[in-house]
Amino acid sequence: MSINRIGLKLGAAVIVLMIVILVSSGLAVDRLFTNFYDAQMKDNTQEIAAHFATMAESNDTSSQSMIRAFAKFSDVKVFWLNDEGRILTLPREKQPNLSFIRSRDTRRLLSGHSVAFQNHDVHGNRFYVVGKPIQIGETTGSAIYIVSSMKKIDDSLQRLRNLLVLSGLGAFFLALGMILIMSKLLSRPLLRMQQMTDKMAKGNWDTRLQVGSRDEIGMLGHSINDLAASLQRYRDTRRAFFSNISHELRTPVTYLQGYAKVLTDGLVDSDKEKKQYLSIIYQESVRLEHLINDLFDLSKMEEGQIKLNMEWMDLKITIKTTVQKVKLKAESKRLSLQLDLQDQVPLIRGDRKRMEQVLLNLLENAIRYTEKGSVLVRLTGKKEATVLSVSDTGIGIPKEELPYIFERFYRVEKSRAREYGGTGLGLSIVKKYVEMQDGTVRVDSQMGVGTTFTLIFTHEKKQRRDGMK
């Protein structure tokens, strides 16, 4: 059983983050309450010490009993410091541990200054000490120490710490369960994607992911599905291409061999029959040449070795030259080959030879897939662009296949591919050459009505590129 490494890493990272947050929060809360209680204890002890010092300075005989009563009520201890520096307890008080008394504090009190500090006994119990001088007239005759135990505060803080630890553990285990569940839920689609890519690497491109979310993971899933669909189309069209190309190569080669053998063996009865066989040999050689040229162009495209000879050119001249080359094919099918060329069309920068090849491919496709009607070539010059379109009244292209017709090896009407001929390379070559000349190509088609290919060459883009040169 494989380990879910993604879920493990994600869960571990979140758990570490949760521990840091809980510990930091716990320490912050503990320090907040500790400082609050300590500050409150110090303020209360300072107030009690100041009050007792005022009572002692009144030199009233009942002041000691009043101080004793207040001390008992306030839960503090009071120690007297006489003018000789000796520590005395109030009457009826047992002699306590006086280890907290320091000589420097005694000297400071008898000189008329207050002291305050925190200390602890041998058992670790904390207490807070405040010393106040007692002034009789203009002189300091004695002083008092007020000792306030912090045991109740420490007990309260300990209970608070225990509560923080318990609540932190509860929050940790609750978060741990949620993290394990969430990490598993988040990592599950990633694991499915990994499994699918493994299948794709093995050539199984038919599988698809079930994407139910619309977040980034869902978008990644859709991208993988699109990639699988593209690879599947590439595989299918490549298989169809090799099948078609083998047939397209075998057919002219068979004709060439057969009729050449007939002529070589002298099996021709008349000059008319000989000319007919030679004509067939010529037509098949031309067909074979076109096929080889397409394959050669495709190879150069794959290797990025196509170089264009860019120059200013008049599309009207290129159109008329190309139309003359396909005129006989159109007339043999009794198709009307029409031109609609605007008088004033701006020159464009392009490769004359490649542009002629683009137009030739479009016209041959239009004639091949049109049984009756016409083929129209229209050229218009606009302020922002020059637009060239080739329209036919042929069989049309299914709407669902329009996005793929410019892909290499792709062929519409696969079941009738041999009837119409072609290799599925023409349109991909057209798109590549047009884009290399800073143009764009789009297609509009309707089944049974016809198809229009539109080439758009933007003037601004051309001028900007020329300016950079």
Image (cartoon, rainbow, N blue to C red):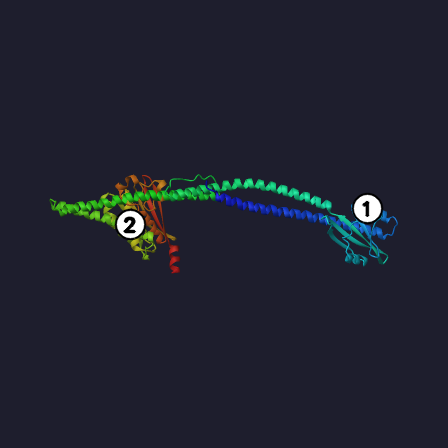
Q: Amino acid at mark 1?
A: Phe
Q: Amino acid at mark 2?
A: Leu
Q: Which residue is mark 2?
A: 295
Residue at the extreme right: 61
Residue 349 locus on image (x, y percent): 34, 56
Q: Secondary structure at mark 2?
A: helix
Q: How many marks?
A: 2
- Circles 2 and 1: CB distance less than 8 Å? no
Residue 383 locus on image (x, y percent): 38, 53
Depth order, front residue of 110/306: 110
Relative to 185, 29 lies left or right = right
Residue 381 in view in this figure: no
Of tags 2 and 1, which is closer to the observer? 1
- Position of 352 relative to 73 (above/below): below
Number of the label disc, if any, that sits on residue 70 = 1
Residue 423 locus on image (x, y percent): 28, 45
From mark 2 to mark 1, how far is it between C-alphas?
Answer: 110 Å
Query: Which quadrant would the C terminus be assigned to in this image?
Result: bottom left
Depth order, front residue of 422/361: 422
Q: Residue at x 76, y 48 (%)?
A: 148
Looking at the rendering, which quadrant does residue 273 occupy?
Answer: top left
Relative to 119, 433 lies left or right = left
Q: Secondary structure at mark 1?
A: helix
Q: Residue at x 71, y 44 (%)?
A: 155
Number of the label disc, if any, that sits on residue 223 = none
Residue at the extreme bottom: 469
Dot 1: within a 10 Å radius of its alpha carbon, few (fewer than 14), some, or many (20 or more) residues?
some
